[in-house]
Image (cartoon, rainbow, N blue to C red):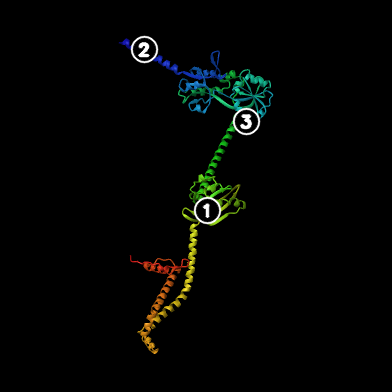
Amino acid sequence: MTRFVRWSFFLLGFFGTTAFLSFAQESSVVKIACFSKERVIEIRDGQLTGFGVEVMEYIAERNGWKLAWHHTTLPEALTRLRNGEADLIVPLGYEEERDLLFDYSEQELLNTWGQVFAGPDSRISSIVDLQDKKIGYIRDSFFYPILKDLLRQFGIDGKFVEFSSYEALFGGLRGGVVDAAIGDRLEAYASGRMRGVAASPIVFHPFGLHVVGPEGDPRGVLTTIDQELRRLKEDGNSFYYRSQQRWFGQGASEVFPRWLGILLLILLLGMVLAYLWVYFLRREVRVRTREVVRLQNLLKNIIDSMPSVLIGLDREARVVQWNRRAQELSGIKAEDAMGRPAVELLPEFASDFAHIENCLNNNLPYIQHKRPRESRTGLLYEDVVLYPLISKGAVGAVIRVDDVTEKVKLEEMMIQSEKMLSIGGLAAGMAHEINNPLAGIIQNASVIRNRLRPDGPANQRTAKELGTEMDVIKAYVECREIDEMLRYIADSGKRTSKIVKNMLGFVRKGDLQKLPTDIAQLLSDTLDLVGSDYHLRKQYECDSIQVERDYDS
């Protein structure tokens, strides 16, 4: 039993140690996916080599890593990193879309830029010196379209000549086939390519090649690589710069020119200021646009709220403004009316639209007052005014139509009222003249009837003095119906007096006030006044009409 326990502990320790060593060895392996880039990552004699390989192996040796390289294509390298089959990609240029998926090293493994090269005695020192120059580039050059677009933006004309390789390109530059050449500064500095060629101060489009790892850098590999690259770049005689000179030649280890960095900083500052200026300008434009829209809406609301029909017309009488009242009159919406001939929309105003040209030529308005027009609701009266509109090149007219039907009716009522007031004044003056003889007629008729009474002592005495009797006179009066005539004279006089009284009450001007009124008496007075009317044209009397008065019911 004791021997069994000892063997159990021995086997457990052996397999545990083996598993730990296997795990430790696996955790120190860094899998790198890479793709060919001349002198950075390339295969020579079946071996993977290049500047990027040397630097990464140097960093791995210092940190106890074992690098497992997998040479492939860029798309495959991205797929392997995404699927966790690789820990790093070396090298890779920065792109915002990729930065959303992966982490880039802060330190660039290698940086480069486009450079213009010329002969040693060339006077090309700025981009404007490339005007009318022959500029060489190699086939599929990354920097060729960039410089071409840059020259176009500056308005510089240059003739581009294509070469198959850097050797042919610089050979053409030395032989005078071209005046200048463009290329990647690292590839151009490669061994043997710069003889008889000088780098001009013209540099453009700098970019860096990074080491890329998974999002979040779970193993901390990128952090270590950043620390190592920063340390290597601080020492001008470090392995990093020695390897760079070995692969790209003397001068390739130069850092980006300081003066160009300052220039780029100034340009960046200028871009920031320009952006701020554009931002504030756009904000001011937005504020003013909102104000313009507010004023336009206010003006539209004012125009739409007016009771008049307002129509804006151009010189050809096409609609440019159509308010809500015009829409109600025509039944046509503003958006449907815009740009259409006004005569098609409101044919009843065709005669008015024809005066636009005359208004514009004479700069005088066209006005029509109280013009009658038949409508679905009856006869309307309208004021039509056509104003010329000439302002800052805008030529047209505004037509305004006001419904004055109520105004016309009110004016007619006022005229009738004034007539009645005139009649009232005349009646008041005539009443006295009528009432005096009328009173005499009524009174004398009453006196005559009294003097014909047979029972009157004075009448009997006077009859005897004249040799007759009152009974004889009475018989004569009855025979000749004189008494009936006298009664009719008295009744007619009273009726006439009542008519004059009612007419004076009707035309008399007085203050409006609320008073108790006998409705039956008011109706009777009104009927009496109307019953005395006589129509001159139709020649009939209103009293010939029988009116039944039943006020109690």
Amino acid at dot 3: Arg
In the rendered image, residue 369, in percent from the top left (x then y), is placed at 54, 57
**How much space separates mark 3 and mark 2, taking CA atoms?**
77 Å
Amino acid at dot 1: Val
Q: Is residue 253 visible?
A: no
Residue reaching furthest to the top: 3
Residue reaching furthest to the front: 479
Label number found at residue 11:
2
Q: Quadrant of residue 250?
A: top right
User: Residue sitting at 42 percent across and 15 percent down?
Assistant: 22
* Residue that numbered label 3 is attached to: 152
User: Residue sitting at 36 percent across and 12 percent down?
Assistant: 11
Whichever of labels 3 and 2 marks the residue nearer the N terminus, that label is: 2
Label number found at residue 480:
none
Which quarter shows the C terminus? bottom left
Would residue 328 be found to the left or right of residue 516 on screen? Answer: right
User: Residue sitting at 59 percent across and 29 percent down?
Assistant: 261
> In the displayed structure, would residue 549 be above or below residue 301?
below
Would residue 89 be found to the left or right of residue 391 on screen? Answer: left
> In the displayed structure, would residue 517 be above or below residue 99?
below
Which quarter shows the N terminus? top left
* Residue that numbered label 1 is attached to: 401
**How much space separates mark 1 and mark 2, taking CA atoms?**
112 Å
Instruction: Please say if the residues under marks 1 and 2 sit with CB atoms less than 8 Å apart.
Output: no
Q: Nearer the viewer, residue 237 or 121?
A: 121
Amino acid at dot 2: Leu
Q: Quadrant of residue 218?
A: top left
- Helix, strand or loop at label 2? It is helix
**How much space separates mark 3 and mark 1, taking CA atoms?**
60 Å
Whichever of labels 3 and 1 marks the residue nearer the N terminus, that label is: 3
Whichever of labels 1 and 2 marks the residue nearer the N terminus, that label is: 2
